[in-house]
Structures are given as C-alpha cells and as structure tokens.
Image: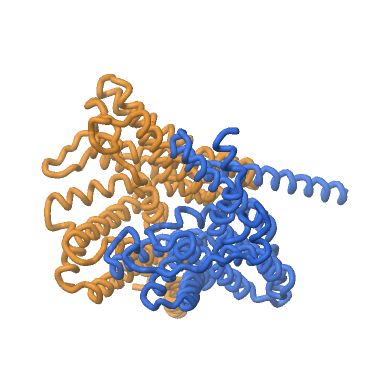
Amino acid sequence: MSPLLKSIISPDFGFAILRVMTPILYPAIGVAISALAGSINIALEGIMLVSAFTGVMVSAFTGNLFLALIMGILAGVGLSALLGYFHLKLKANIILAAIALNMFASGMTIFLLYIFAHDKGTSSSLKSLVFPSYQIPVIKDIPILGRIISGHNILTYFALISVVIFYYIIYKTPLGLRIRAVGQNPDAAESVGVNVNKIKMYSLLLSGVFGALGGLYLSMGYVSWFARDMTAGRGFIAIAASALGGNLPLGTFFGSLLFGIVNALAIYLASLEVPSEFIQMIPYVATIAALAIYSIQAMSKTKRRKRISEESTT
Amino acid sequence: MEKFVLKYFNLIRTIIAIAIGIIISIFVIYVISKNPGFSLKSFLLGPFLSKGRLGNLIETASPIIFCGLAISIPFQAEQFNIGAEGALFIGAAIGTAFAVSTSMPMIIHIPLVLLVAGLVGAFWGFIPGILKAKWNASELVASLMLNYVAYFLGLYIINYHFRDKAAGYLVSYQLPKTAWLSQFVPGTRIHWGIVIAFVFAILVYFFLYHTTLGYEIRMTGFNLHFSRYGGINVFKVIIISQVIGGFIAGIAGMTEVMGIHRRFNWQMSPGYGWDGVVVAIIGRNHPISIIFASLFLAYLRVGGQVLNLLSDIPSEVVTVIEAIIILLITAEAFLEQWRYRITIKEAERKEVEHEPAS
C-alpha cells in the first residue's frame, strides 16, 4: 500500500478533516443565514479577522477566556451590524460595502496589532489563551471512531451543534419563518406586516455571531496566535460551501465537509513530491468546479419547473 | 448655489466622503503618534516633498489606473467580477515566461508580450463570464477563487520553470532588453506604462460612451431585464464585459514587470486588483474619474509609506481610510436628506419666480 493511501485511511486523517472544516463551517452557516434572508453577507472574511484578533488581544491582556469569547463575538457582530446599517439604512450595495468592511478589518487588525504587539506579522509576542480540547467519555474508547471524533477543540464540537441550532432557528422559530419569507419574496412578506429590514438585520447579526466563532476558533484553537490576514480566504470559501448546500443546514454542513476533506488532503499531499503550489490550488479549483456543477443543476431544475408550470397552465 | 449642488451632487458627496476619511486619519494619527505634527506632515505633504516620491506617486498610480478600468467595465454591466488581481498576476507570470523565452525586435516584442499577458487575463475574465452567462453561477465567487488559482499557478510557473537561480532570491530571469518599457524621467522610475494607462482610459471612455457595445454594457447594468426585453444580447454583454476587464488587468501586471523591475518578482499578490475596486468605486466607474481616483489613492499610499518609514504609525492606516471612504461613497442614502431639502428649496424658488408671470 502506498504511504499516501495509508495515511489517508488512518483515523488521523478523519481527525484532520474535522479540524480544518471547523473554520469553514462557522462562516458557511453565517453566509447561509444571511443568504436565506436575501442579503448575502460576504464580509465574513473581515468578521472572522476582527473576532480572531479581539479574542487573542482580550485573552492576552486579561487572561480571561470567557471575556475573550464574549468580546470576540461582540466584535464580529459589531462589524456585521455596521454592514447591516450601511446596506439597509444607507442603501449601500451590500457587496461593495462588504468589500470595504473586509478591507477595513484587514487594515484595522494589522494597524492595532502593530500598536499593541509592535509587530505587523503575528501576535506571537503575546501569550494568548486557547479554548480547551475535550475527550468525549465513552466515545474516546471506541477504536478508530474515538480517535476521529474525540479530543477536538470545544469550538469544533460547537460548530457541529451550530448546524442543529441553525436548523432549529430556520425551521422551528417564528424568526426563521420570517427570514425565509423575506428571502423568498420580500414584497409579500412586507404586505403581511413583516418588517423586512429588521429581519434582514437580525439575519446579518446572527451571521456575525457564527462568523465570530469561526474567527475565534482560528486564532484560539486552530493555532494560538493572530497573524495578519490569517483567514486566508476562508470567509470566501464559506460562500461557496453554503451555495453548494443550497444554504440549507445539512447542505451547508456537507459543503463545508467537502472543503474540509479537500483541505486536509492538501495538507497530507504536501509530504509528496508534488509542487506545493498545485496542492494549495486544489480547494479553490474544487470550489469553482462545485460552483459550476451546482449552478448547472439549479438551472436545469428551474427550467424543468418552468416547463411543468407552462404545461399545467396550457 | 442650489443648482450647483444638484448638478455636481455626486462629486460633492465623493469629496465630502474623502474629507471625512482624511479627518478621521488625522484624528487617529494625532491620538496615537508621539510626534503628531511631524507624522501628519509626513503623511499629507510627504509625497510632494521630493522628486523621487512624486515619481513614486506616478509609478504607483499606473497599475491602479489599469485595474480601475479593468474593474469598471464589468461593474458598469453590474457584473461583480473582482478577479482583476488574479488576471494581473497570471497575466504577468505567463507574459514574463513568454518574454524571456522569445527574442525579437523591440517594436514587435513589447506589443506582443503585452498582448499575451492581456489574452491570459482575458481568459481569466472569460471563465466567470461564461459561468455567469450560461448557468447564472456567481461571478463574485468564481472570480474570487480564480484569484487564488492565479496566484498559485503563477508562482508555480515562475518558481519552477523561469526562476533565475543566480539572482539569490525568488525572481524570474530578467526580461530581454527588447521587452523593457523605458523609464523616461531621470531620477524616478516613471515608465511608459503610465502613458499606456492614459491611452487605455481614453479608449475605455470612447468604448463605453460612444460605441453600441459600450451602450449595451451600460444598459445591461442599468436594468438587465429591460435590456433583454429591448433586444440586447445580455449573454454576450455579460461575457464580453468580463473578458475586456480581464484583458486590461492582464496588461496592468505586465507593464509593471516591463517598466519597473524587469523581472517577475512578486511572491505575494501585489493587491493592485483590489485597489482597482477602490478607484472604480471612488471614480463611479467613469474612466476619466478613475485616473483622478488612482492618483489620489497613489498619494495616500505614498503618504502611508512615508509615514511608515519616518514615524511610529503603520501604513495600514491608509487601508482603513480607504475602507471608510468607500463605505461612505457606496452609501446611496448618505447626504440624501440634504439633497432632498435642496431640491425642494429649488423647486419652491422656481415656483415663486414663475408666479408673477402667470
């Protein structure tokens, strides 16, 4: 058996998939919630950055993990509130406003990093806390499966739970119903008394919460420092991951899982004699391919639906 | 006065947005710097204080003008293709590969190398274009992903096949002299790229505002369904606007390589594509305004560099200002209340003027 195949079917590979999937799953849920309300949030790249930065800074200067969590989430939600304010109140195009906020987050975090840590690269001079890992009792003793599922960072488990929370919000709460109504037909929702802008704002804020958790995991779980632009496009990959799953809970999960697998594969392939540039390219090429396949399917679906409705009317 | 405000409302709004951005930056520098007077002077006047820096300003503006034009054409058609960065990088990488492996007289070599880089960029614009036109796939996501693909592919081409091992650091072979854009102002690195950029700005202006295809691009951006109903081939417009954008972005990167370094020396993506988005927004997608927006952005950039070099303030303050300015400019409702009041006042005044006549 080739060494590559051997390492891929090992439990460590399964463990790695969950690990690299976490910082994609969180923002993917964030994108999905905002997309369901019809105003897609592409500022998650920036939201993750400010949260990752705030978490590290607060934990380094206060030594309080809980405070770091709260402040990190507030920072992320603050940025998405800003996006909501500019888009909904000041009528900015949401894509352009989000691009501006991503720039703002990138510049601001590097600027403050320099002010606080006197370094424009990483915060490694500061001692950041990390969220703890957790061995699941019983499950950790199951062979193979235990080594894949147990021992992850708490935020990784919460990412999986977030899929359920996302499902619950969207399908079991009045807010979720309104979010879907606003996304499908804002005029109809407005006509029955739903405040469209308010619902869109709520969905953007929720999307900020999930994005913030993704950022916190990145700097305080995945690694234990902040580095400039450390999100490395994950906020954008998340857009593709949620689009892949039709912005639905389970779909978003599987979309993120796919990118987790590809990314983990890229890490494992790096030990081979293949130029690393090619391996690093894989997730992005895969995203384009997946986007194309998804769009082709969606297109043929709407065409079919149109044909059926035309046939039934004639 | 009211008439003037209404006529130039967008321009005034842009200037106010820029002023707010600069005032915030002055405030930040004032609060953080230990020597605020000196820091502010370095930032705001620094770019004009020596010939070298003034040259720097022009050099920096040149690729930004190209990228602004490259972004503005798809933006005019409401296509959010932000792949100028990738088109620029891959265009320059393959253009460099082509330039170092061919030799011919300068008069053919320069245009041919630029053409190759442009065509590679055009292909990079074509992919999101066709995906959008045919299957309605988000050009935003596709072009974003292609930026990363271009980056890694470009690095692979240069580092594995055209790397000059004698240079001591990761760069390509030097371009043959026949593919150099000469620097024509002594004491600076200002090269023919800026002239080509101006020519392109005029060409783009002519294309967008005085040709049928340009009209169709603008109409599609204005209202896609109406355009389709009115007989415009929207499919073609969506693809072509992104292909032309990619073409110009490809040339942007190549002129930098041919005019400044004469080697491909980027190990990081240079970011001009994103600057292009910034100036396209500030210049409201108008080619001539984009020139001024690019000069302004270059001024901020050089100011930021001077600040970084001479004071205790990191240059990233510029990125933050840019973000604030763009936010305010894209916010349609920003100052709308003011315009509304002026419009009413103007209308009332007209009414009063007309009354005695009736």
In the foreground, B284 or A82: A82
Q: Quadrant of residue A155?
A: bottom right
The residue positioned 22% from the left and 51% from the top of the image is B57
State the hue of chain A.
Answer: blue
In the foreground, A93 or A50: A50
Q: How many marks?
A: 0
Asked if residue B60 lies left or right of residue A19, the reply is left
In the foreground, B116 or A114: A114
Q: Residue furthest top?
A: B104
A243 up-or-down from B5: above or below: above
The residue positioned 40% from the left and 60% from the top of the image is A103
Q: In the rendering, at what x and y percent does residue A306 appear?
A: 78, 48
Q: Quadrant of residue B313?
A: bottom left
The residue positioned 39% from the left and 32% from the top of the image is B157
Asked if residue A308 lies left or right of residue B322, the reply is right
Q: The chain coloured orange carries which letter?
A: B
Q: Does any portion of residue B101 appear in the rendered image?
A: yes
Q: In the rendering, at what x and y percent does residue B349 appear?
A: 42, 78
A148 up-or-down from B250: above or below: below
In the foreground, A223 or A81: A223
The residue positioned 27% from the left and 54% from the top of the image is B298
Q: Does any portion of residue B14 appear in the rendered image?
A: no
Colouring scheme applied when the structure was drawn:
by chain
Q: In the rendering, at what x and y percent does residue B214 appear?
A: 48, 43
Q: Quadrant of the N terminus of chain B?
A: bottom left
Asked if residue B292 lies left or right of residue A99, the reply is left
Q: In the rendering, at what x and y percent does residue B266 appear?
A: 32, 42
